[in-house]
Amino acid sequence: MDTRQLTIFVEAARARNFRAAALQLGIAQPAVTQRIRQLEENLGFKLFHRINRGVELTPAGQSMLIEAEEILARTKGALEKAQQIRRGELGTLRIGYGTSVMAERKLPTLITRYGDEHRDVTLELLPGMTMEQLIEQVETRKTDIAFIRAPLPPLPQTLRAMPFDRSKLCVALSERHPLASSPRISAGDIVREKLLLPIDEIGLGLSSSALTLFEDAGCEPQIGMRIANINTILALVEAGAGISILPESTVRSTRGIAGVPLDSADAWSDCVLVVRRGPLALHVDAFVNMARQAYQPSL
């Protein structure tokens, strides 16, 4: 029994006439008769009674018609779904990211645009992982893409990184802080302040970018806390628990916090997209291409 046999059977049952079914299907009537006979032999029971000028379903045939229509509908749906996946119109896109990346506008804007243009692709957003976890998740195919703050550790050979965003860093202070109204701040101005940093591996990520500014200025900051979540850092800064060094776009929209420019030409943080090497599923490749087009490095 195959789908062609079932299609002929369903059409014959609806038309109640083999000749009419043959015309509808664009085949010869003997072919309809032969396929119905083969189907009945395979099933071991009659599907039709012959009547004047046509046929009618037997009780077993009536039951078979319901099942055949469901099988054909499921088969059609499965084929359409497979074709959508092949065209990149359907699937699941799993994106891992550090919280500081999502706190800026560029990634949410990209995800929104992609979702609008690929409505049948399910997006799964997986936040809050460490850099090591983000990389491992892409390598083991638990996620398709990860957005990570540079600098990165050496990546496995199966992965590649491409630039996604470049953000100017600033000093985040409570609006009540004495330095909140300063036009610019140097690393030396805040060396005695309690510095709140994201939890990154030593020498990597946003923390590394912040600490490098102090190192280049020849001073050592006073680290007050290391915190996993950027929103928690912002809340503590607003409460006056310390200061932080964060991307301007993250600070700009936060009430109660001032973002003062740093007096350094190197006060930048780069974000990269990490993805597997080699051919990608079309819906993943479409997202990567959209991210590539969105990259506009600041000078």
Image (cartoon, helix red, strand yellow):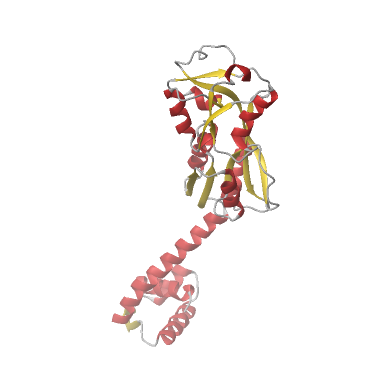
On the image, the x and y values in percent for residue 298 come to: 65, 25
Residue under the image location 43 percent in, 87 percent down: 41
Disc count in the image?
Answer: 0
196 over 31 or under it: above or below: above
Residue under the image location 31 percent in, 76 percent down: 63
On the image, the x and y values in percent for residue 85 come to: 54, 55
Q: Nearer the viewer, residue 6 or 48?
A: 6
Q: Nearer the viewer, residue 108 or 192?
A: 192
On the image, the x and y values in percent for residue 165 come to: 61, 33
Residue under the image location 47 percent in, 63 percent down: 78
Q: Nearer the viewer, residue 262 or 71?
A: 262
Q: Quadrant of residue 214?
A: top right
Q: Is residue 156 left or right of residue 8?
A: right
Q: Is residue 281 left or right of residue 278?
A: left
Q: Nearer the viewer, residue 114 or 14?
A: 114
Asked if residue 215 shows in the view, the reply is yes
Q: Quadrant of the C terminus?
A: top right
On the image, the x and y values in percent for residue 281 come to: 59, 53
143 over 47 or under it: above or below: above
204 over 82 or under it: above or below: above
Residue under the image location 34 percent in, 82 percent down: 48
**Residue found at the far left of this picture:** 59
Asked if residue 55 shows in the view, the reply is no
